[in-house]
Amino acid sequence: MSRIVYVNGDYVPEEEARVSVFDRGFLFADGVYEVSSVLDGKLVDNAGHLARLERSLRELKMAAPCANDQITAIQKELIARNDLSEGVVYLQITRGAADRDFNFPKDATPSLVMFTQEKTILNNPSATKGLTVVTLPDIRWHRRDIKTVQLLASSLAKQTAKDQGADDAWLVEDGFVTEGTSNNAFIVTDDGKIVTRQLSNDILHGITRRAVLKCAEAAGLTLIERPFTPDEAYEAREAFSTSASAFVMPVVKIDGRILGNGVPGPVTQKLRELYIAEAKATAV
Ligand code: PMP
């Protein structure tokens, strides 16, 4: 069934959705995006995603096409028109269409595109089974804190992982894990401490990461924000990743080393439960 998507002011069937070949998103990956999850037809932590969107736009000196409350209205309209119960709403803003030139155009109008995707988030079988990951070099640019649409390095890494029979890749720079291809990476050490890399330009400031850290703190768990090595991850009791589209996802194997008993661990499962409860309670 065809979705209704939003393109620069219009709600159209997906087959009719068009942007210009001169759009700078297409020519330069000159665009930013956000993905908000939807549970029971409601948006999860959307204010956090829109705040990060504003920051991404600011860092790239890109104009917003409209105010955040208008974006939220469009998100809700798309959820309603597509009868979306569980899944995600994707939104992308680019600097707009202008004749190809490296310098920013003076008079381009930013472009806004949004669409929904149905997705099983709560009963995702991977949450029960756990993911296998491989580590790969992090070849991305140095402003990973900005959520740009230039995702080729992550896409290549994810495909390489798949070709090696794994579900995902954790990226490594200077001997330390930065994050997953599309998620933040965590380990639980042998003495039960939760370790994840601290915020900087090296990683995306995950909205789910922040919420999960809050849940962990409220549950009295010990958190340490610091980089960790693949060797530490191999020795970890548990590992998991976080993202808006998968929530808390257990990792049970890294570079062929089985973690713990090879099944999702208790800390990971607890955090997934706590996060789901929080997401359901606060979705709007
Ligand atoms: N890191 C990267 C590189 C990502 O692409 C994502 C998800 N888009 C995340 C982390 C997780 O961020 P969030 O929890 O906001 O989805």
Image (cartoon, rainbow, N blue to C red):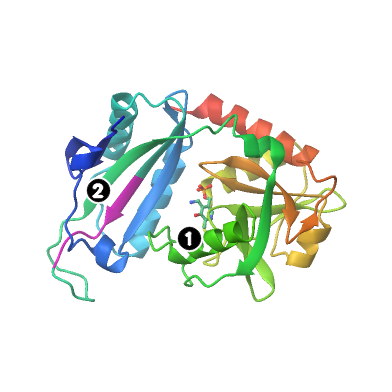
Specify the label residue 112 is tagged with. 2
The residue indicated by pointer 1 is 155
Dot 1: element:
helix
At 43% from the left and 25% from the top, the residue drawn is 85
Establish whether ligand 1 lies closer than 8 Å to the Cβ of label 1: no
Q: Is residue 22 left or right of residue 214?
A: left
The N terminus appears in which quarter of the rendering? top left
Q: 25 or 223: nearer the eye?
A: 25
Specify the label residue 133 is tagged with. none
At 35% from the left and 56% from the top, the residue drawn is 32
Q: Where does the image place residue 83, in percent across and percent down from the top left? A: 35, 23
Q: Are marks 2 and 1 in contact (CB under 8 Å)?
A: no
Q: Is residue 36 one of those drawn in magenta?
A: no
Above/below status of 41 relative to 253: above
Kindly indicate the quadrant of the structure image that contains residue 157.
bottom right
**Magenta stretch in the rendered image:** 91-98
Above/below status of 73 relative to 141: above
Q: 162 or 239: nearer the eye?
A: 162
Q: Is residue 22 left or right of residue 38?
A: left
Above/below status of 60 relative to 117: below
The C terminus appears in which quarter of the rendering? top left
**C-alpha span from label 2 to label 1:** 23 Å
The type of residue carrying mark 2 is: Leu
The answer, for residue 93, to whether it is visible in the render is yes
- Badge 2 crowding class, 10 Å Cα cut-off, few under 14, some 14 to 19, many 20 or more, is many
Kindly indicate the quadrant of the structure image that contains residue 81.
top left
Q: Where does the image place residue 128, in percent across and percent down from the top left? A: 69, 35
Q: Where does the image place residue 67, in percent across and percent down from the top left? A: 26, 43
Tell which circle, 2 or 1, labels the residue nearer the N-terminal end: 2
Q: Where does the image place residue 45, in percent across and percent down from the top left? A: 48, 37
